Amino acid sequence: MIVIDDDLWSAVGDPTRRRMLDKLLLDGGGTATSLSGHLPVTRQAVSKHLDVLDRAGLVHATAIGREKRYRVDDAQLSRAVAQLSSVGATWDARLRRIKKIAEAIQNSPLPKKEGNDHG
Amino acid sequence: MEYGTIEREVHIDASPEVVFDVISSPEHIRDWWSAETGIERVAGSTSELTWRDEASGRVDVVPITVIDVEPPHVFSFRWTHGPDETATPSNSLLVTFELTPSGAGTVLRLTETGFRERGWDIAVLEEAYREHVAGWDFYLPRIAERAVRQVAAP
């Protein structure tokens, strides 16, 4: 099963934060100021988003002068991606098992309650 | 397209009665979901889904509440609400199985809703994933690339 991590999910669930992550990955890191130059949001808003990402462990900050420089945590981002893809994928796997089990029962030689008229 | 929903459809070469039994009985849920549960096929029945990992000793427990039981047509339940919470649209995900006879078999339709209500916005993410648009299709290759670089570094 997937254990859904609420903080991680809500952190990557926001489109602005996804764009920030993308930019940070592309540039190998960045500050609130550098990010706000590329996004249609204020530096203050970027700072708040960075706090959310930080709390979810998706980025790590190091102080450089008066500003903090952020880098993406690859391992944590991988986890988020894995959870994302498993949301749909796990149901595919479960449905495959449901299909297999039901068809095995249908084809079993044991008597069934309903008519059995395989052609 | 409704981004707040996961939708799947699968054809099964078994009667709706058999399929209904598989999706709704604890005996079979153990097989296809690897979870122990005590749910009964009655609307309002509450129980838990329990996963035990023998190797690590880890136990995961998730509440489940049966919502609708119409054999052999509909089976739905809510899950992922908090322990001791009553399942509501704002604290749980709703899974609905709909069964339609098709030839000698059954079309089983699954929907899972409630992501948006929980504020997760997973639906948007899933859509992005499925359609390979902005965002996620960048991350995976980049992570892979970086991993390869790290491995290749002397």
Image: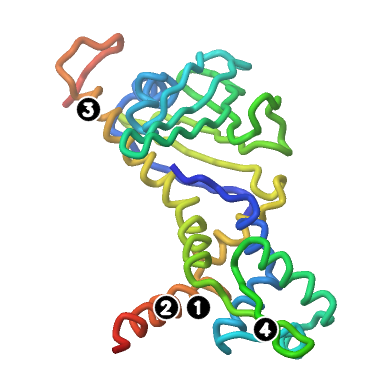
Residue lying at 78% horizontally and 75% vertically, measured from the top left: A47
Residue lying at 48% horizontally and 34% vertically, measured from the top left: B60
Badge 2 marks a residue whose secondary structure is helix
Q: CA distance from mark 4 to mark 1?
A: 22 Å
Point out residue B117 in the picture as x, y percentages from the top left corner: 72, 45
Check disc 4 and report the residue beneath it: A69
Q: CA distance from mark 3 to mark 1?
A: 41 Å
Badge 4 marks a residue whose secondary structure is strand
Point out residue B31 in the picture as x, y percentages from the top left corner: 32, 29
Q: What is the crowding at mark 4: few (fewer than 14 residues within 10 Å), some, or many (at least 20)?
A: some
Check disc 2 and report the residue beneath it: B141
The N terminus of chain A, quarter of image: top left
Amino acid at circle 1: Phe
Q: Nearer the viewer, mark 2 or mark 3?
A: 2
Q: What is the crowding at mark 2: few (fewer than 14 residues within 10 Å), some, or many (at least 20)?
A: few
Position above or below: B112 against B138: above
- Which is more toward the observer, A104 or B47? B47
Check disc 1 and report the residue beneath it: B138
The C terminus of chain A, quarter of image: top left
Residue B43 location, quadrant: top right
Do the residues under discs 2 and 1 have CB atoms within 8 angstroms?
yes
Residue A94 location, quadrant: top left
Badge 1 marks a residue whose secondary structure is helix
Do the residues under discs 4 and 1 have CB atoms within 8 angstroms?
no
Q: CA distance from mark 2 to mark 3?
A: 40 Å
Whether callout 2 and callout 1 share a subunit is answered: yes
Sequence-first disc among 3 and 4 = 4
Check disc 3 and report the residue beneath it: A104
